[in-house]
Image (cartoon, rainbow, N blue to C red):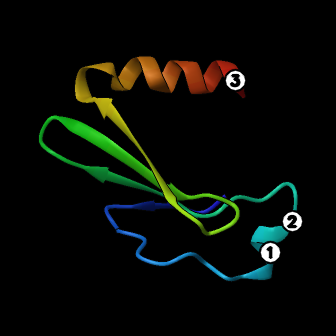
Amino acid sequence: MTILYDKVIHEYDENPLFDEPDYAQPLTVEPCDDFIVLTQWDGTGECQHCILVERRDKDALIEALQRAG
């Protein structure tokens, strides 16, 4: 997966690599005042998904991701 820091993805990436079952569209991580914003296009290019992580929960998110891995 491509993870981009502090960049906004405006368009769906047409790269055929992202059509493979074990690949995903790039994920952006954008810091804001109160939240960390995670944004990614869905696999069909129909819509973008956005997750707001409260800054105070950043360590809990990292811990959960480490457990999942």
The answer to whether marks 3 and 1 mark residues whose Cβ atoms lie closer than 8 Å is no
* Residue depicted at 80% across the width and 80% down the height: 16
Residue located at (34% from left, 31% from top): 53
Which quarter of the figure has residue 20? bottom right
Query: Please, is residue 40 above or below residue 38 in the view?
Result: below
Residue lying at 57% horizontally and 63% vertically, measured from the top left = 26
Q: Going by the image, does 14 lie left or right of 29?
A: right
| Above or below, comparing residue 7 to residue 52 in the picture | below
Looking at the rendered structure, the kind of residue marked 3 is: Ala
Q: Do the residues labelled 2 and 1 touch (CB within 8 Å)?
A: yes
Question: Which structural element holds mark 1?
Answer: helix
Residue type for callout 1? Leu
Q: Mark 1 points at which residue?
A: 17
Spatial CA span between label 2 and label 1: 6 Å
Where is residue 9 drawn, in percent x and y?
43, 71
Which residue position holds label 2? 20
Residue 25 in picture, x, y percent from top left: 63, 63
- Residue 68 occupies which quadrant of the picture? top right
- What residue lies at 80% left-to-right and 75% top-to-bottom? 17
Q: Is residue 9 left or right of residue 25?
A: left
Marks 2 and 3 close (CB-CB < 8 Å) = no
Q: What residue type is labelled 2?
A: Glu
Q: Where is residue 40 in the image (x, y as percent from the top left)?
A: 52, 57
Lower sequence index among marks 3 and 1 = 1
Quadrant of the drawing holding the C terminus = top right
Which sits in the foreground, 35 or 43? 43
Q: Residues within 10 Å of mark 1 (few under 14, many from 20)?
A: few
Residue 68: numbered disc: 3
Whole-angstrom CA distance, mark 3 to mark 1, is 24 Å
Gap in angstroms between the C-alphas marked 2 and 3? 22 Å
